[in-house]
Amino acid sequence: MHPKNSITPEVVQQLLTVETDFGNTPIDNRGAMIFNVAAGTNIEDALQTAKTLSSGLGQICDHLHDSLNMGEMAYCDGVKTLALIAEAVSALVWSVQRGLKPKAEGEAHQ
């Protein structure tokens, strides 16, 4: 039977993240990392989190810019915080992209 004539609902596999480490923060000599994106998270949730973190990152950068422009002090730990947030956003996006690969490869083989 041709699929467009079928009344059976198409089964769609939910797209999920894959585990992705970030922050270069091992907690033991086996390579276990403190920070990572957990495998199995819905990609819409991961992208929403990345979007929220990215927005916050922009706000922190604007605040830092304004503070420095007014002659206030800047601290290295504040800049390191910016780097950690940027890495978290990147890890979320990479995790989503890696989660999409198996689906795209499966479609190419069909």
Image (cartoon, rainbow, N blue to C red):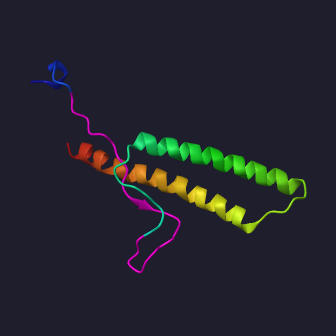
Pick the front one: 107 or 33: 33
Question: Residue placed farthest to the bottom in the image?
Answer: 29
Residue positioned 53% across, 47% down in the render:
50
In the image, is residue 5 part of the stretch drawn in magenta? no
Side of 59 relative to 97 (left or right): right
Residue 42, percent from left and from top? 38, 43
Against 7, residue 15 (above or below) is below
In the image, is residue 28 part of the stretch drawn in magenta? yes
Pick the front one: 30 or 54: 30
Residue 79, percent from left and from top? 70, 62
Residue 84, percent from left and from top? 59, 61
Query: Which quarter of the figure is the C terminus placed in?
Result: top left
Query: Which quarter of the figure is the N terminus placed in?
Result: top left
Q: How many marks?
A: 0
Residue positioned 80% across, 63% down in the render:
74
Side of 78 relative to 88 (left or right): right
Residue positioned 77% across, 54% down in the render:
64
Against 1, residue 89 (above or below) is below
Q: Indicate the quadrant where residue 72 lies.
A: bottom right
Pick the front one: 98 or 104: 98
Q: Which residues are magenta?
A: 10-32
Residue 40, percent from left and from top? 34, 50
Question: Residue placed farthest to the right in the image?
Answer: 71
Magenta-colored segment: predominant secondary structure: loop
Question: Residue placed farthest to the left in the image?
Answer: 1
